Amino acid sequence: MINTILKPLDEFLLSVERDTDTGFYFITMGIPANWVYKSTNIIECEVLHETDGGSLVKIYPLNESAVIDDLIEFGRIIIETNERIAKMQEEFDNKMKEMKEQLIEQQKLFMDELDEMKDKSFHEIEEKVSKVGEAGDDENEVKTKIYNNIV
């Protein structure tokens, strides 16, 4: 029965203890460094030790209205909330990666189209210049025809 109740905390639970002075139970959990948690007016969440990899936190009641089941539920909420945050972050990161790939593809298509337009434009000018030059017109007429064809 106790194992079933503590199952949601399995990966993170270090201990369940009882403070003999107050008679209150408290739980100690190890959680990843980037996880969020917040004390309430009924349950306190105190950092016992912190490293780059994570934090060791003590969860205990502030008064007799919170019992061990409340502490376990509080620990479960910390875990579920942070797992949802991690999932949302992963989905967002995947979406951003996809959008980045789409933008890179659009940029490539735009640059290809731009290069093609440049090549085509200068090729057309070259053809017009050579046609005008082949016609044997004098130099001023050639410049005028080129200018009129461009504009």
Image (spheres, rainbow, N blue to C red):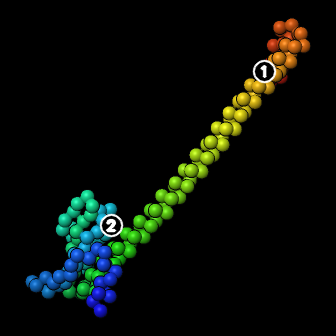
Residue 36 is marked as: 2
- Disc number lying in front (2 or 1): 1
SS class of the residue under badge 1? helix
Type of residue at label 2?
Val
Q: Residue furthest top?
A: 138
- Most foreground residue, 90 or 44: 90
Q: Does any portion of residue 118 appear in the rendered image?
A: yes
Is residue 45 something that shows in the picture? no
Residue 112, relative to residue 31: is it above or below? above
Which residue is under mark 1? 126
Give the side of residue 122 with respect to residue 20, left or right. right
Residue at 42%, 70% (x, y): give it.
84
For marks 2 and 1 on the same chain, the one whose residue lies earlier in the sequence? 2
State the count of labels: 2
66 displayed left or right of 125: left
Mark 1 belongs to which amino acid?
Glu
| Picture quadrant where residue 33 is located | bottom left
Q: Quadrant of residue 71?
A: bottom left
The percent position of residue 1, horizontal first and vertical second, equals 29, 92
Query: Which mark is on residue 15?
Result: none
> In the displayed structure, does residue 106 sit left or right of residue 12?
right
Q: Quadrant of the C terminus?
A: top right
Is 133 placed above or below 37 here? above
